[in-house]
Image: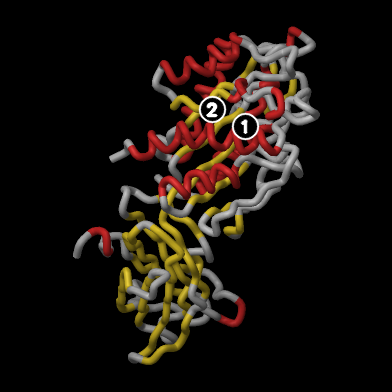
Amino acid sequence: MHRYFLTVLMGLLSFTLQAENLEPHGMPRLLSPLDYQIFQRSSKDQGMVHLEANVGVKENVDEYRVRIVNSQGQTLATATGSIEPTIKDFQEKSLRAIFKLDLVVKTGGWHRVEVTLCRDQRVVTEFTPVHIGIGEVFLVAGQSNSANYGAEKTSAQSDLVRTFNGQDWQVCKDPQPGASGNGGSFMPSLGDALQSQLHVPIGFLACGIGSTSVREWLPTGRSFAHPPTLVHRVHEMTDGKWESDGQAYQTLVHRLQSMGKHGLRAVLWHQGESDANQKNPRCTLSGANYRDYLGIIIGQSRHDAGWEIPWMIAQVSYHSPDDTGSEDIREGQAALWHDGIALQGPDSDALRGPLRDNHGQGVHLSGEGLRAHAQAWAAKLVPWIESQP
């Protein structure tokens, strides 16, 4: 079958019986996919969809049936199989059967996933159909301008742009779940820009935290000589050095791991204001240290997630019209590109005047600035994505 119309991959099909209690009242439960979940495509034309269900005990069902159809009602993929226990002797009330299936599906959305469970050719359970998209997924992290501190709350215009809140996929509407702040972000506008150019669903996971230094994102066990301006996410050690509590890093890694291996396109990192030109010079970070600390975060995140996640790093150090940036921090960020550790992101220090809040006097972005920021990210992302195999 032509790859544009779908390939079914059965090699990862597996069944297991686990010694756990059934769901309440023994009811089968569809664990994956979630409704309106977006899966990262693995090529221009297709991506992997993971299906998983608790089907109850063996005596209740003996067969699964899966069908995936597109929005025009055309069948993209089907799969059927028997549910066989791997253990002969088991207590009916204490064991449950789990089926897991991976299908390669054509890009696009919203596709509808239909799953039924049968016994002796008769349908026993028919799960409520869920919708899925195959497209591009991004994790957005850093400080306030990566989070919800923009002057205008925005919403994606395309229904194909979604945000994951840790439990459900929802319409991409500010404030973004998972990030601090209660204002606007660049993600809805970026989602619309990417969707209109790439013609696939776009998903975001947000975990930015306002006012954070790169030092606060370090994993525990990595010490540094001087504290950031705000110290409630770091603590002083007995030798006089400082250490992060690791909570910001753990949040980032947890969100990466929730998508699975190769489950997103890239981490978009936007941070640096809290390390540049601080009022207390002792709290200002050198560009060399910035490069080293962010390099540690990137390397450790790849190790903990189990794959080489691309990171795209913006140049960020702007505070006000009187303090438009730190060349030292900017050089530290650029060093990560030059050393091949990360990809070059947009220069957001160039967003000035009416693109900033408080009539151009603030550090956060105005509504116009959020949209300009989104376009700057898209200008970096689209050529890179289209250049991938």
Where is 389 relative to 340, above or below?
below
User: How far across and down, in percent of the image, does residue 188 sit?
Assistant: 60, 47
- Left or right, 235 with reference to 162: right
Element type where label 2 sits in the image:
helix
Crowding around mark 2 (Cα neighbors within 10 Å: few <14, some 14 to 19, many 20+) is many
From the image, tell me which residue sits under label 2.
297
Above or below residue 275? Residue 182 is below
Q: CA distance from mark 1 to mark 2?
A: 12 Å
Quadrant in the rendering for residue 221:
top right
Q: Residues within 10 Å of mark 1 (few under 14, many from 20)?
A: many
Residue in the image at 24% along x and 59% along y? 3
Mark linked to residue 142: 1
- Could you tell me which quadrant the C terminus lies in? top left
Amino acid type assigned to the residue bearing label 1 in the image = Gly
Q: Is residue 341 above or below residue 367?
A: above
Q: Residue at x 46, y 70 (%)?
A: 53
Give residue 151's position: percent from left, percent from top: 75, 38
Please report contact status of discs 1 and 2: CB closer than 8 Å, yes or no: no
Query: Which sits in the foreground, 304 or 359?
Result: 359
Camera-side residue: 195 or 306?
Answer: 195
Residue under the point 75% across and 12% down: 322
- Left or right: residue 310 versus residue 13 is right
Q: Position of residue 121 (x, y in %)?
A: 33, 90
Query: Foreground residue, 204 or 117?
Result: 204
